[in-house]
Image: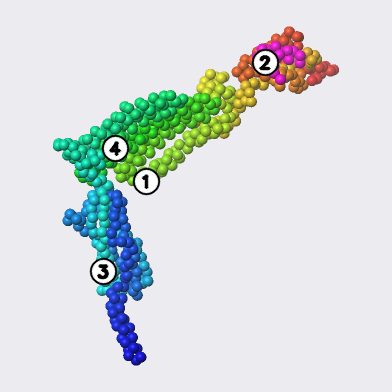
């Protein structure tokens, strides 16, 4: 029993002695969170390695991390590879933990390579600078190039077993290009005309238009793709291959943008114009040209942004700058934008339409000729002139529409007769004048009528009401007044003028 107790005590002491140097030497523990080997499947991507560090000592530590690439299999340092160490702290307090992340990034022009990366972590105890802990880690990275040579294979698939001299890599490249040209020519000259024969029998010409527009772009895309795809046969540098791919991608974007614009212009806009021509509203007649102008700006802009992205230019700042410029321009053209929205409001609310006769707040009576997005164009019927009014004024000021609810205008003719005149005769004469005029409307609800308006100082005033088409209202009003005057003269009805009656009483004038 006593011997067992002695042995146990000796064991505890021995373990404490063995562990004491280890604890003192490892003030910071480093735990690897990822495997020491990773693969970049496609150049232009990146991989990360993470280590968790923990301060299990009683004092703070200064943290320093560095990484360096080792030699690849050929005995050289890999090119177009970047290393970055990420840790957002420089000190580690007692009991504190954190992460250190190594990121290995490969450029698109990087070749296939396998190489080690050496990571050195240095932890210096801040209250005892002589106590320094060094930790070294090694990770291995394998990069697969974006462009790998397929070797002497036609189409990159079939081994070139042709007799000399056609069994070389150069001839494999030429033969592959020729086959791509034959494929493109077959689609352009054979398949496309066959499809076109079927589309001619359809009721609409939509499919014919799309085939006509896309025929040449498809041919160009096949030829360019065949050229780029055939480059895999040749053993060219990654930089040259990347440059050619950039040119190809820019060309594809330009072809697609051009094709998209032609489809937009010759299909979308074409059918929108046909549809707007069949409708009675003016809003589509204005919105279709607006849509066409928007397409002219939007489609090339998208193409330009895509091209800049392909060339590696950061378009975020460009877009943000364009947004700021847009705000400045919006403030500068605030009045124009107000007229624009007012024009849309006129087209949607439709208080008047083209051809309507309206009276402006100024008293001018005009015929509406055009309702634009910025202004309304009218013809002044009285002064024979064109008036252009900003849409803001048309929306915010009073406008009388003579063409609503129909094109009939209520007119009046007021005339006074002398006291003592047969009023029934006056009323009958006025109605006869209106009923005999050929342009005066005689319909239910719009028959001429006469009313005794007032007893004036020198006359009894009557008012004749009648309806007439607005295009004839000025002429008919004049003719009706002339006819009333002639009829009163014929009937012996006196039209008095203002007068005063003076009587004398005892030689003194009295009024």
Front residue (pair 439, 397): 439
Q: Quadrant of the C terminus?
A: top right
* Residue 169, quarter of picture: top left
In primary-sequence order, the first of circles 1 and 2 is 1
Q: Looking at the image, is mark 1 or mark 3 nearer the viewer?
A: 3
- To which residue does mark 3 refer? 134
In primary-sequence order, the first of circles 4 and 1 is 4
Residue depicted at x 71% and y 22%: 445
Report whether residue 258 is seen. yes
Q: Residue furthest top?
A: 490
- The residue range painted magenta reads 427-444
Q: Is residue 97 left or right of residue 243?
A: right
What element does badge 1 sit on? helix
- To which residue does mark 2 refer? 440
What element does badge 3 sit on? strand
Q: Quadrant of the N terminus?
A: bottom left
Residue depicted at x 37% and y 46%: 316
Contact (Cβ within 8 Å) of mark 4 with mark 3? no
- To which residue does mark 1 refer? 316
Image spot of residue 464 (x, y percent):
71, 18
Front residue (pair 251, 40): 40
Q: Is residue 216 above or below residue 313?
A: above
Image spot of residue 106 (x, y percent):
27, 52
Q: Tag on residue 225?
A: 4
């Amino acid at each position: 029993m006593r011997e067992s107790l002695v042995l146990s005590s000796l064991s505890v002491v021995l373990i404490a002695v063995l562990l004491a140097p280890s604890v003192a030497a490892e003030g910071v523990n480093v735990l690897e969170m990822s495997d020491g080997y990773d693969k970049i499947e496609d150049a232009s991507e990146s991989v990360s390695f993470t280590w968790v560090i923990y301060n299990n000592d009683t004092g703070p530590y200064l943290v320093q991390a560095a990484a360096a690439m080792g030699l690849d299999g050929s005995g050289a340092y890999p090119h177009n590879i970047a290393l970055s160490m990420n840790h957002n702290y420089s000190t580690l307090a007692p009991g504190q933990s954190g992460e250190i992340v190594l990121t290995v990034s490969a450029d698109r022009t990087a070749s296939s390579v396998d190489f080690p990366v050496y990571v050195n972590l240095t932890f210096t105890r801040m209250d005892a600078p002589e106590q320094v802990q060094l930790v070294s880690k090694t990770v291995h990275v394998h990069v697969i190039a974006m462009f790998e040579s397929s070797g002497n294979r036609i189409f990159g698939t079939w081994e070139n077993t042709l007799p000399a001299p056609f069994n070389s890599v150069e001839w494999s490249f030429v033969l592959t290009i020729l086959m791509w040209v034959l494929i493109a020519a077959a689609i352009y000259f054979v398949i496309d005309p066959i499809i076109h024969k079927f589309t001619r029998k359809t009721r609409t010409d939509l499919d014919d238009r799309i085939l006509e527009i896309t025929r040449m772009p498809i041919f160009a895309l096949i030829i360019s793709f065949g050229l780029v795809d055939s480059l895999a046969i040749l053993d060219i540098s990654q930089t040259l291959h990347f440059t050619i791919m950039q040119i190809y991608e820019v060309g594809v974007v330009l072809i697609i943008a051009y094709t998209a614009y032609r489809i937009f212009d010759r299909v979308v806009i074409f059918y929108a114009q046909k549809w707007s021509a069949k409708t009675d509203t003016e809003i589509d007649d204005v919105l279709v040209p607006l849509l066409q102008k928007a397409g002219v700006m939007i489609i090339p802009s998208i193409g330009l942004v895509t091209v800049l992205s392909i060339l590696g230019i950061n378009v975020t700042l460009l877009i943000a700058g364009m947004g700021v410029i847009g705000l400045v321009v919006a403030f500068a053209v605030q009045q124009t934008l107000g007229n624009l929205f007012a024009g849309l409001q006129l087209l949607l609310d439709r208080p008047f339409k083209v051809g309507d006769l309206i009276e402006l707040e100024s008293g001018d009576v005009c015929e509406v000729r055009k309702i634009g997005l910025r202004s309304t164009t009218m013809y002044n019927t009285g002064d024979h002139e064109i008036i252009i009014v900003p849409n803001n004024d048309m929306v915010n000021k009073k406008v009388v529409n003579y063409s609503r609810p129909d094109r009939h205008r209520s007119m009046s003719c007021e005339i006074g007769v002398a006291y003592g005149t047969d009023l029934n005769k006056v009323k009958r004469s006025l109605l006869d004048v209106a009923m005999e005029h050929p342009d005066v409307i005689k319909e239910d609800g719009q028959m001429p009528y006469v009313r005794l308006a007032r007893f004036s100082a020198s006359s009894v005033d009557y008012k004749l009401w009648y309806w007439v088409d607005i295009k004839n209202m000025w002429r008919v009003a004049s003719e009706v007044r002339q006819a009333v005057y002639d009829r009163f003269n014929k009937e012996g009805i006196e039209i008095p003028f203002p007068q005063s009656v003076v009587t004398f009483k005892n030689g003194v004038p009295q009024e």
